[in-house]
Amino acid sequence: MISSIRSTIKSRYIIQIAVGAILVSFLLSVPLARRFGAGSSDPIMVNNVGVSAHEIEARIKSEEKMQQEFQKRFSGISMDVIYGSSGKSSNPKERAVSDLIEEALFESAGNTAGIVVDNNYVIDQLKNPAFVQHELGDIVPQSAWNGRHINFKALSAHLNRAGKNIEWFEDQVERRLVRQIAQNVSRIFIHAPYSQLVNAYVQRFVKRTYQVATFELQTYIDKLEKLPVDSTVLRNFYNYENSQAKRYWSTEQRDGSVWSFTPEAYGISVSDKKIEQYYKRNRHRYLKEARKLDLEIIKVSTNKLVQELHSSLKLDGSKFKELAKKHSIDKKTASDGGSLGMIDPITLSSPIERAANKLVKDGQISTVIDTKSGFAILKRIGSKPAIYKPLSDVKSEISKELKVEQFSRVFKREVRNSVRIAHRSENSVTNFIKKRNGKKESIATPASSGAQSAPLLNRITTVDGFAFDLIGSTGYLVKLTNRVKAEPEAFVKVEDRVKQDYIKNQAAKQMQSEMKAVSNGLEQHSFGSVPSQTYKDVLPSDSGSLDDLFKKGLSSTRLFELTTPKAYIVDQGASHGFVAQLSTVSSYDPKKLDSELLTIQNDLVMQELRTIQRTFIESLLGHATIKNDLRGTSARGN
């Protein structure tokens, strides 16, 4: 299946990135030509890139689920407070659409700059767990991904059930790679001044003293609970929260019947010959021990040095261990002559893995490898071939898989036909269930939400409608018998809960107001009369004295970002708020700073990337044409 992708995504896709081309060409309004063409039915158009209704619906559901988790975690606090702190809308639809528009901006910018992707790069990324999980997780089901490889047969079956095909999947992969490259190209513009490197070093390695004032939310709640609250105020709060997040809505109730079917009811058998043929075609799936290579590595930080070493090794590869001990910056392997031992190449970083797999004979030296932390050279010392499980060990497993495969085809064909004619013949479904010995159970959501067939029940749109699918080795046919849609709960029914939430929301605002007043006082370097506590000799790697504050919600990341004495942060968790000031910073050894500069610089590039991308997005938004922007005016900044 990978070979079919390789032929479909042809070699015309070559990475073509010119420094600044994305931003410059976009600002000059170079005409766009999206290769995959936006569909005329796409609800949102960003330049020539369409955002489909399916994408919008899926992202809104994801945002709603995340918001529900936030509401459980920060019970009673308004979503305006939670999302407002990060500059986001409290409306899940607005957040979803904003994110999708930003992604479309990157895609159109990538097309404008002429970014296309090489076939080998596509294949590499389809084997990259991080890319598959983070970028393709919504279209590659768990059943088609084993953590290392995509099962394209299972993927194709999944896509067919959703009305898609492999060609659609290939388009999605390329689109997302173009978008990813457009996002990552902004690293080109990152420069870390020496002063920034010093600050980063202080964050990690230099002891410091903090002074922290802690505010408890419950204290403010207790005070407000003693005061009367006007019913009109509560009703306004109820209406606002429902309009933004459906906070006081009932949960949709569904009832149905589910019939389960197994391969045994179909009398399916598989011959030994078919099992043996399947084993030979798919032997790679029954790996007992992966192929391993005995490798040595030299890692250096400069291109000049790596080129000198590589030239020397081309003349005399026997010097590898000697040069590794002398020049390699990899502390784990340098003392042993760069030995990585006998390892599976997949455990190495992508560029090093690719280079290792190109070494076909013992003693061979790799080309220079460009890595995130510098440069590397590999030498192959030996190899150990892959070991596969014998047929006798996996025969029953293959037999079961082939039976399920046959069962899947027959079951889906029969149930599809019976459901299709159900409106003409009431007995068609009944006869099918009786013929195939379907076992009936009742199902209800959300009560039975954990059941395997629950997603099928939720998929049905009309009462007396059907849905079916194969889950694992069991076929399911589900009928929706009753549906009570979600709707706003009556105010009188939830008034007590609304009051509790309103008080908690107001308490959070009061606490934030007092925290702001304290932080304003720190402009004059004083906590005033507010109680505070001092924490001395703190390091990120040894911050046990602050653990209690971190458990209450103080962000360790934000706290340790402070590097200048008298600098401060205002932070808030679910139950407490904090104003924390960096009081003093100990002196440090300049020699140790110099030894850590390379690592710090590489880390800063990643940290700065988000800020660079944010600026880039704002520039793109300022010059983009967005048709049918579904965000609210607040989300658009109007």
Image (cartoon, grey):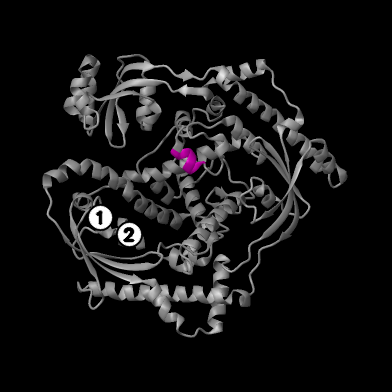
Q: Which image quarter is the N terminus in? A: top right
Main SS class of the magenta portion in the image: helix
Instruction: Name the residue that disc number 1 marks.
Output: 543
Earlier sequence position, callout 2 versus callout 1: 1
**In the image, which disc is placed on residue 236?**
none
Residue 133 magenta-highlighted: yes
Which quadrant of the structure image shows residue 385?
top left
Q: Is residue 5 above or below residue 61?
A: above
Instruction: Name the residue that disc number 2 marks.
Output: 550
Q: Which residues are magenta?
A: 130-136
| Residue at the image point whose x is 23% and y is 18% from the top | 313
Which quadrant of the structure image shows residue 511?
bottom left
The crowding category of the residue bearing disc 2, from other C-alpha atoms within 10 Å (few below 14, some 14 to 19, many at least 20), is some
Q: Are marks 2 and 1 in contact (CB under 8 Å)?
A: yes
The residues bearing labels 2 and 1 have C-alpha atoms spaced at a distance of 10 Å
Please give left or right for residue 378 compared with residue 350 in the image: left
Please give left or right for residue 580 compared with residue 552 in the image: left
